[in-house]
Image: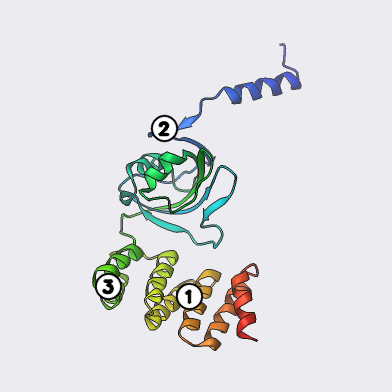
Amino acid sequence: MRRLSPLCLLVFLCSWSYAQPEMKTPNGWTYEVLRAGSGPVLNAHNGALTHNQLTDAKGRVLVSTYQINVPDYQLMSDLSPAFQQAFSVMQAGGKYRFHIPVAEFQDAMRSQGSLTLSGGQVMWDMELLEVLPPKPDGARLLAQTLKQEGPDAAFQQYRFLLSSGEAYFGEWEVNQAGYLFLGQGKTAEAIEILSENVRNHPNSANANDSLAEAYLKAGEPAMAAKYYEKSLNLNPQNDNARAMLAKLRE
């Protein structure tokens, strides 16, 4: 039986791999499977917990949950139809890379250019950690109430949603909620929320860093230093915590 030489076999395999058709999402975007998933398939009726990273055509990282090691939650029905269709190819446990034309990305984001994008396309890596029940994003609900009814009503809503479980509050969403109140000058409320985040995620450098900032804005430098130091111990690469500690110790 005649066999191919190793060199011929390598050439054959390379030519076969290049001949494979590109994978396309239902809305026509090219994508790659970086790691196959084996869990539930994502659809428009789910919530999704992901790590994700957005990169422009020059290789610049624009957004990344990996940088602070905190995953992001998204209610799929809140997304535009284009994203819903694209992300329907994902399975829990998998990691995917989507190549999206810039104009289509901006249209799908329903935003007016909050990101400065260069080149013809962006690359969005999505790691689907879990497929979850379709609960609304708690931080998003609070932001709406804060805008329409003010911080007192929003804080009451926070307590209700947290106890009732009617909205999703992961580490990222609680952190966002804390900053909503911090931005309104409601430092006591922000400290309560961010303290709870630290209790639930004691090994999160980001949660400790955020609580430190709240204490600093509340005029409690000793407590701020305590949590900046915790954050730096958890993540020695946290330059913000290092810089703030240096200022507090001057």
In space, the residues marked 1 and 3 are separated at their CA atoms by 21 Å
Q: Is residue 188 above or below residue 239?
A: below
In space, the residues marked 1 and 2 are separated at their CA atoms by 42 Å
Q: Which corner quadrant holds the C terminus?
A: bottom right
| 176 to the left or right of 245 | left
Q: Earlier in the sequence, mark 2 or mark 3?
A: 2
On the image, the x and y values in percent for residue 192 come to 40, 80
Please tell me the numbered disc located at residue 157. Answer: 3
- Relative depth, front residue between 207 and 128: 207
Please tell me the numbered disc located at residue 198. Answer: 1
Foreground mark, 1 or 3? 3
Q: Which residue is mark 2?
A: 28
Residue type of the residue flagged with mark 3:
Gln
- Relative depth, front residue between 133 and 110: 110
On the image, the x and y values in percent for residue 63 come to 51, 54
Location of residue 165 (image quadrant)? bottom left
| 13 to the left or right of 44 | right
| 5 to the left or right of 188 | right
The residue at the point 49 percent across, 74 percent down is 210
Q: Which corner quadrant holds the N terminus?
A: top right
Which class describes the residues within 10 Å of circle 3: few (<14), some (14-19), or many (20+)?
some
Residue type of the residue flagged with mark 2:
Gly
Residue type of the residue flagged with mark 1:
Val
